[in-house]
Amino acid sequence: MTIWSEGDGRSLLRRRTALAALCVAVPLLGLGYQVAARYTAVAMAGVPFGPAWLLGALLQPWGVILLLCEGLGLLAWMTALSEIKLSVAVPLSALSYVLVVSFGWIVLHERFDPVQLLGAVAILGGVWLVGRSRS
């Protein structure tokens, strides 16, 4: 049995929801969080850090998106952990790193060097190996 199979009689719908949360929602919300954090930081670049900075960041449109992604990401993570072992869930959550680097390269036109490519391949290989292991 792998983490992708039905398991030991648990509700199939509940297990599939947890897998969807882990494999889709957590990485995408993590990506959304990182993108929103970048744009919020750029918007706040000239403001000295302090209470005014925090209030200004929270009032930025990207700051609101950042908070939404963080909150929804927490809900997705808790959903995943309700059905999937931590030792399996954490490595699978590493897909977020690959998404962030890919987004930076494709959308933001950031440099993507061979070491980053090797790291992304290693993460994907690790996720594949974890997915094949017993849950």
Image: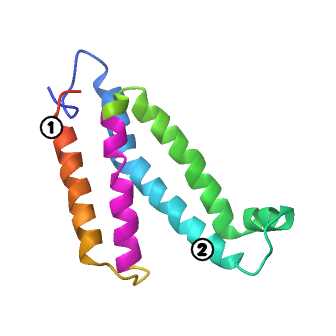
Q: Identify the residue shown where x is 18% and y is 52%.
A: 125
SS of the residue at dot 1?
helix
Crowding near the residue tagged with mark 1, few <14, some 14–19, many ≥20 C-alpha atoms within 10 Å: few
User: In the drawing, does residue 112 fall left or right of residue 27?
Assistant: left
Residue 12 figure quarter = top left
Residue 20 figure quarter = top left
User: In the drawing, does residue 18 fall left or right of residue 62?
Assistant: left
Q: Identify the residue shown where x is 81% and y is 63%.
A: 55
Residue 95 is covered by the magenta coloring:
yes
- The residues colored magenta run 88-106
Q: Could you tell me the amino acid type at mark 2?
A: Tyr
SS of the residue at dot 2?
helix
Q: What kind of secondary structure does the magenta stretch mostly adopt?
A: helix
Q: Which residue is mark 2?
A: 39
Crowding near the residue tagged with mark 2, few <14, some 14–19, many ≥20 C-alpha atoms within 10 Å: some
Tell me how far mark 1 sits from mark 2, CA to CA: 37 Å
Name the foreground residue: 43 vs 122.
122
Quadrant containing the C terminus is top left
User: In the drawing, does residue 73 fall left or right of residue 85?
Assistant: right
Name the foreground residue: 60 vs 14.
60
Q: Could you tell me the amino acid type at mark 1?
A: Arg
Q: Earlier in the sequence, mark 1 or mark 2?
A: 2
Q: Identify the residue shown where x is 48% and y is 33%.
A: 78
Name the foreground residue: 84 vs 12.
84
Q: Which residue is mark 1?
A: 132
Which label is found at residue 24? none
Residue 67 figure quarter = bottom right
Quadrant containing the N terminus is top left
Position above or below: 85 against 105: above
Name the foreground residue: 116 vs 8.
116
**Residue 66 pos. (x, y %):** 61, 59
